[in-house]
């Protein structure tokens, strides 16, 4: 059985992983997903892990497909009560079913379980078809340095920057709080080391995949693994497929293009992380710079409109990985 390890963010990552799951039986794949934990936060005394939960709900068939996030059939009575008490973030509403997950996770963590162990316990309820792992057991939260109207700089949590402000505030940089005392989770590092193929889902390259890569030990594991490492572009035709990737890329000074993001990760032969990079059929001009940098690249349709179209993208990524392995 081939070991496939996928680095992923939340909603877009879940769509990609569902595609991989479609292929699992036919291609004899054992799938492990390493999820971004930079969006995690403490809120109303509970540990909230947005990307882990988006993956779990989507793979477990419990996600709200209309909103694209959260649980189906939600109510928000508890959040309304918390707002009435002046507790929490009124602009960051947690559904009642979702709160059940956060309460359970917090109880497990307070019982002494690591986040990896707590995630395994939570995921056991659902038939995910994959192993779901947090990128780190340590608390490393993504903050954003913004500038107020009076010119003063301050740090806010990424979720406040994204959900409350929609990124519409002068932004200087992204900061991983707690990074100095953190490491990548041992199980996540082992999943990279033992993989036959590693894929980067088309998740945000700055605050999803990028945050995973900042964790001490992760870049080294990706450079050292014997597996080919292939990424899928989250940029199609010069625009992000979803989320705030364009704003994030501009903030760190990377051009919003399929080629620029691939080169931002960099080719492994030159000390980067990727052996191959998939771009969309709308971006064939990206292939030249990628090939010139020493990276295998291919242009294929990348819109994830269904599990089947996502599966086709994963199949193309695995094909490119096989090509990179023999190059």
Image (cartoon, grey):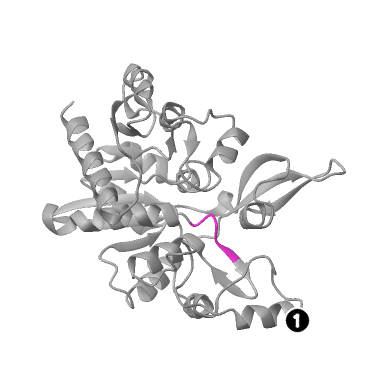
User: In which quadrant of the rendered image does the C terminus lie?
Assistant: top left
Work out whether 66 lies above or below 144.
below
The residue at the far right in this view is 150
The answer to which image quadrant residue 91 occupies is bottom right
The answer to whether residue 4 is magenta is: no
Count of number-bearing discs: 1
Q: Taking 269 as reference, is 98 left or right? A: right
Residue 214 locus on image (x, y percent): 50, 44
Find residue 247 and report its horizontal and vertical position in percent.
60, 39
Horizontal and vertical percent position of residue 230 = 30, 38
Callout 1: 10 Å neighbours few (<14), some, many (20+)?
few
Residue at mark 1: 85
Residue drawn at (62%, 35%) of the image: 251
Is residue 170 toward the left or the right of residue 19 in the image? Answer: right
Q: Secondary structure at mark 1?
A: loop
Judged left or right of residue 5, residue 241 is right
The residue under the point 65% across, 75% down is: 44
Tell me which residue sits at (34%, 58%) in the image. 187
Image quarter in which the N terminus is found: bottom left
The answer to whether residue 106 of the structure is visible from this angle is yes
Q: Is residue 227 visible?
A: no
- Residue 281, position as x, y percentages in the image: 32, 31
The magenta segment is 37-41
Q: Main secondary structure of the magenta part?
A: loop
Rendering quarter of residue 222: top left
The residue located at (69%, 41%) in the rendering is 171
Give the answer, above or below, for where 22 lies relative to 198: below
């Amino acid at each position: 059985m081939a070991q496939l390890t996928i680095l992923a963010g939340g909603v877009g990552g879940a769509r990609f992983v569902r595609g991989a799951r479609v292929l699992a039986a036919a291609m004899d794949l054992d799938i492990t997903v390493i999820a971004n934990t930079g969006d995690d936060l403490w809120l109303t005394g509970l540990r909230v892990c947005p990307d882990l939960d988006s993956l779990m709900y989507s793979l477990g068939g419990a996600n709200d497909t209309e909103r694209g996030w959260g649980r189906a059939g939600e109510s928000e009575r508890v959040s309304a009560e918390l707002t009435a008490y002046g507790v929490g973030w009124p602009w960051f509403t947690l559904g009642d079913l979702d709160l059940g997950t956060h309460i359970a996770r917090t109880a497990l963590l307070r019982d002494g379980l690591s986040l990896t162990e707590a995630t395994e316990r939570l995921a056991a309820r659902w038939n995910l078809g994959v192993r779901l792992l947090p990128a780190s057991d340590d608390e490393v939260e993504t903050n954003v340095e913004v500038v107020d109207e009076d010119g003063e700089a301050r740090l806010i949590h990424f979720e406040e920057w994204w959900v409350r402000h929609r990124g519409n505030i002068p932004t200087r940089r992204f900061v991983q709080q707690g990074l100095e005392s953190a490491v990548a989770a041992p199980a996540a590092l082992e999943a990279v080391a033992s993989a036959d193929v590693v894929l980067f889902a088309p998740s945000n390259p700055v605050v999803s995949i990028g945050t995973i890569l900042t964790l001490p030990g992760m870049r080294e594991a990706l450079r050292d693994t014997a597996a080919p490492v292939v990424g899928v572009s989250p940029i199609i035709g010069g625009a992000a497929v979803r989320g705030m990737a364009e704003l994030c890329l501009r903030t760190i000074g990377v051009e919003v293009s399929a080629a620029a993001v691939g080169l931002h990760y960099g080719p492994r032969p030159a000390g980067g992380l990727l052996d191959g990079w998939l771009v969309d059929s709308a971006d064939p001009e990206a292939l030249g710079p990628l090939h010139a940098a020493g990276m295998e690249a291919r242009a294929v349709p990348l819109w994830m409109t269904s599990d089947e179209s996502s599966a086709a993208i994963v199949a193309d990524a695995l094909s490119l990985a096989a090509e990179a392995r023999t190059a």
